[in-house]
Amino acid sequence: MAIDWFPLWLSLRVASISTALALAVGLWLAWTLANRSFRGKEVLDAAVTLPLVLPPTVLGYYLLVLLSRNSPIGHVYESLFGGPLVFTWQAAVIASLFHSTPLLVKSARAAFESVDRSYERAARNLGASELRLFWRVTLPLARRSILAAGALAFARSLGDFGVTLMIAGDIPGRTQVVSVAIYDAVEGGQGTVARVLVLIISALALAILTLANRLTSNPFGPRQTAL
Amino acid sequence: MIQARVRKQYAPGPDFAGFSLDVDVRATAGVTVLFGSSGAGKTLTLDSIAGFVRPDEGRILLDDQILFDGAAGVHVPPRSRHCGYVFQNYALFPHMTLRENLEFAVERRPRLERHRKVNEMLEKFHLADVAGRRPYQLSGGQKQRCSIARALIGAPRVLLLDEPARGLDAPLRAELYSVLRQVRQEFGIPILLVTHDSEECFELADEMMVLREGRVVQSGAPRKVFEQPANVDVARLLGLYNLLSVEIKSLDPGRNLSRLRYQDFELTGPYFPGRLIGDQVWLCIRPDLLGVAPRDGRLAANQIPAALLRVVDKPERLRLEFAGDIAVELTRADYEQHGPVKEWVIQFPQTGLRIL
């Protein structure tokens, strides 16, 4: 039986793009949460964490309402790109973005907070702006943990099912990602396809988690501590 | 010149008694030591000057620039304060080489000037050979010199050091002191140094300020402070004195005499102006001003009997510790001429007794 590899490639592409976006958004959020004190910080933190605990269908429902053809965002998108956003692979990117960013923010915040504060004080004392402090000091010092967080976000993107199904649907050859394809294969009695995809995804996830663990187990070797 | 008059209040919490800082610190060119035990507010004062901590009220002036003014709402951010800061753990960036650490501090300068400045500092602090190494590849002394060089390279107008000698062994301490003396001479800026080590005060300080529970309790030249501690708390902090609780029994200004009662014994001292008979005061006397002799028979004037608890070997002399928290220091030869004795008398001088 010929296996259709499209869902696997689509999943990898969606996960790569959404991880890149999640890093951009998530690092900024994590930095803000770790370094700034402002009113409503805990509410923001809770809101960022919310997707971790909400059922995927609830999250999917919100996104569907937010991005549908009748919504303002959907309208703008349609007038810009000439087609609806929902039930495209771009919608799958948004789905996994919302699915994976909370995890990334959580671990990136912990990574930023684990950087010895005296380095940040030293950088400010030496005349560094907050931006330079971030790029030259905090990010390099936290980079292994940040990479690990990115790897985890990537793995989580690969594994999304519910949110993607709600807003990107299950259109073979267009929006059908690997997790959805496996569901279809099991439902349709294609045992071999299901088994192969299940094994590939499991191996991939295992490899990513191992990488993430190795990145965090020995953060920066003997250089992390200031002595 | 740096002048900081700041107040900051920390409300008590469930496992925190609360703390209030209320200090007026000023320092001119030379080394000014902030001396006190941990929790006295020394580092908090330093952090207020550097801008890491925002005081509740007060005013911080560096030369003619206002760094902080509570009433006017001025709080210059740390990056614009021109305060060199040497952190207790050095805080050298571990992912940069020593040269990059220095360059970080002058990154805004034109490339040529930057290059020249960095090389100049590397030479001055004997770091040129190891400029390409990362901090973890450096010895303790090199890290220390590098952190001082990094703090100075941007030409700050004050240098702040937070317990720079903590945890250093004797040779490294000596090296630090000589580097700091060199800095004092060559840079001509106020150096504000935090320590709880009275020896360090003597080594380095032109001026010292004694902090206790968030207040400056005494300030002046170290010799003055050590000669005349302002009160018993300062004397305890300096940790160099015997402090005996005595009662004034009589005062005779005519013959410049006084009689003091310590437990069941009477001591004769000089007249103490401004004191009254019956006052309970602290007799403060350095261990090396007391004499000892084996006890035999009657007590002579100004002698009290004391049981020897232990003998402590110090580098230059011996320290005898007696019951009742009295210590006497004398040379080994003086001690050995008496041989091993258990019961001693302590001889108090008649002049040189001070009360607090």
Image (cartoon, coloured by chain):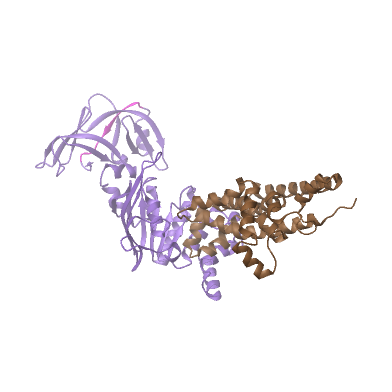
Chain colours: A brown, B purple
Residue shown at 31% from the left, 39% from the top = B287
Q: Quadrant of residue B77?
A: bottom left
Residue B13, placed above or below residue B183: above
How many numbered marks appear? 0
Query: Which quarter of the figure is the C terminus of chain B placed in?
Result: top left
Q: Position of residue B112 (x, y in %)?
A: 55, 76
* Foreground residue among B70 and A221: B70
In this rendering, the answer to whether A80 lies above or below A111 is below
- Farthest right residue? A1
In the rendered structure, does residue B26 fall within the stretch colored magenta? no
Residue B95 visible within the image? no
Seen from this angle, which residue lies furthest front?
Answer: A70
User: Residue farthest to the left?
Assistant: B254
Give coordinates of residue B285: x percent, y percent: 27, 40
In front here: B78 or A44? A44
**Towards the viewer: A49 or B59:** A49
Q: Is residue A161 left or right of residue B333?
A: right
Name the image quarter holding the N terminus of chain B: bottom left
To which quarter of the image does residue B111 belong? bottom right
Q: Nearer the viewer, residue B98 or B248?
A: B98
The residue range painted magenta reads B341-350
Q: Is residue B344 magenta?
A: yes
Q: Is residue B206 visible?
A: yes
Decide: is B77 above or below B320: below
Q: Position of residue A69 (x, y in %)?
A: 65, 62
Outermost residue to the top: B297
Residue B19's spot in the image, x, y percent? 35, 46
